């Protein structure tokens, strides 16, 4: 792309921009880094912290913004290391502080809406919509354990390129998502922008090896896209469809499995007990699968996340 404007910045070869964009009608200023390569090429947008307690992606994005040199770029790399800034600064468990909304359920946003909707609108219109490819970094939430995996949207017009982007990511599992709206990468995908979402890390912990793995994956995708030089690696995948069982009751949660475990129909995921220790729900698998993320806090909340699992599919 040429003569491209990102968040009010006109892009010029070799330029590095570190700035904030104000979300009108809120107190939020979104940090972003724009790295303009010296050679022409694709514009890739990378976001982290749409869920603000998912720290591995946030740290990986900060480090990538420091480590990638414009001299090495063909095209432009735009990094938003922390989208849900007010959630981060008030340490919410991944909800937007001002309205309690899950930011990744309100894209492409609404400038006349709540704070989360206004924030999504700015991120989508000022950054994501200009991308030739989009990478969104996620992680298990503060209460979740997670087996690393990668998403792409199976019905998107750009699914072939998106799937090739997922091949560059070093995870065992790949989810062909059926969700075509409300999430940032889902909305981008349906507008023809090849988009993937990486899940790695858990429990709000920062582990250097996971940050490094996220960075390796992003660099590998950028090589595949021709934005960075070098051969890209390909990692074999097990393709899965994703299913979630939300908690039917609030109480104390006692998981019986670990993420990454394979299970059979009839196996027990765990129990919810009341505050006297009495079992009020036994979560039982209704089909064979692999556990990819689960609630791992004692507290579990009715209609909130309990277990999410994958069922293997034939490659598409
Ligand atoms: Zn997330």
Image: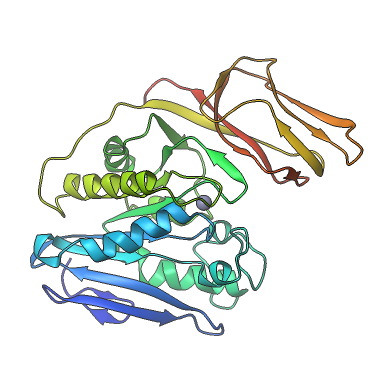
Q: Quadrant of the N terminus?
A: bottom left
Quick one: 34 or 274, which is closer to the camera?
Answer: 274
* Horizontal side of residue 70 vs 183, given as left or right: left
Q: What residue appears at the point 52 percent right and 44 percent down from the top-left corner?
A: 179
Residue 81 to residue 256: above or below: below
Asked if residue 154 can be seen in this view, the reply is no
Answer above or below: position of 194 versus 37.
above
Q: Toward the viewer: 275 or 5?
A: 275
Q: Is residue 307 left or right of residue 199?
A: right
Q: Is residue 47 visible?
A: yes
Q: Residue at x 68, y 26 (%)?
A: 256
Residue shown at 51% from the left, 84% from the top? 24
- x, y (%) of residue 119? 51, 72
On screen, 24 above or below 184?
Answer: below
Residue 268 position in % (x across, y down)? 71, 21
Quadrant of image for the C terminus: top left
- Compared across the picture, whether 173 is left or right of 285 comes to left
186 relative position to 266: left or right = left
- Residue at position x 29%, y 77% in the image: 18
Where residue 34 sits: x, y (%)? 26, 71
């Amino acid at each position: 792309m040429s003569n491209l404007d990102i968040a009010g910045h006109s892009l010029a070869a070799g330029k590095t921009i570190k700035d904030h964009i104000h979300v009108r009608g809120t107190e939020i200023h979104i940090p972003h880094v724009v790295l303009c390569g010296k050679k022409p090429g694709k514009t890739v947008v990378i976001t982290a912290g749409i869920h603000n307690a998912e720290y591995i992606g946030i740290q990986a994005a900060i480090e990538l913004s420091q480590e990638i040199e414009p001299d090495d770029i063909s095209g432009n790399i735009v990094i938003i290391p922390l989208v849900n800034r007010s959630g981060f600064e008030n340490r919410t468990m991944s909800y937007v502080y001002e309205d309690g909304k899950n930011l990744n359920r309100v894209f492409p946003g609404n400038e006349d809406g709540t704070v989360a909707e206004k924030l999504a609108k700015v991120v989508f219109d000022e950054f994501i919509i200009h991308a030739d490819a989009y990478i969104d970094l996620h992680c298990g939430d503060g209460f979740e354990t997670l087996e690393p995996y990668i998403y792409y949207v199976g019905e998107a017009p750009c699914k072939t390129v998106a799937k090739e982007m997922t091949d560059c990511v070093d995870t065992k599992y790949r989810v062909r998502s059926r969700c075509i709206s409300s999430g940032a990468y889902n909305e981008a995908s349906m507008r023809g922008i090849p988009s993937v979402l990486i899940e790695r890390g858990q429990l709000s912990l920062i582990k250097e090896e996971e940050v490094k793995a996220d960075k390796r994956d992003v660099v590998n995708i950028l090589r595949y896209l021709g934005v960075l030089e070098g051969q890209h690696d390909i990692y074999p995948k097990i393709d899965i469809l994703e299913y979630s069982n939300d908690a039917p009751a609030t109480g104390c949660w006692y998981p019986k499995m670990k993420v990454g475990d394979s299970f059979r129909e009839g196996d027990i995921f765990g129990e919810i007990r009341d505050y006297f220790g009495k079992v009020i729900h036994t979560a039982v698998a209704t089909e064979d699968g692999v556990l990819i993320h689960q609630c791992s806090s004692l507290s579990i909340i009715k209609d909130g996340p309990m277990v999410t699992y994958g069922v293997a599919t034939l490659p598409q």
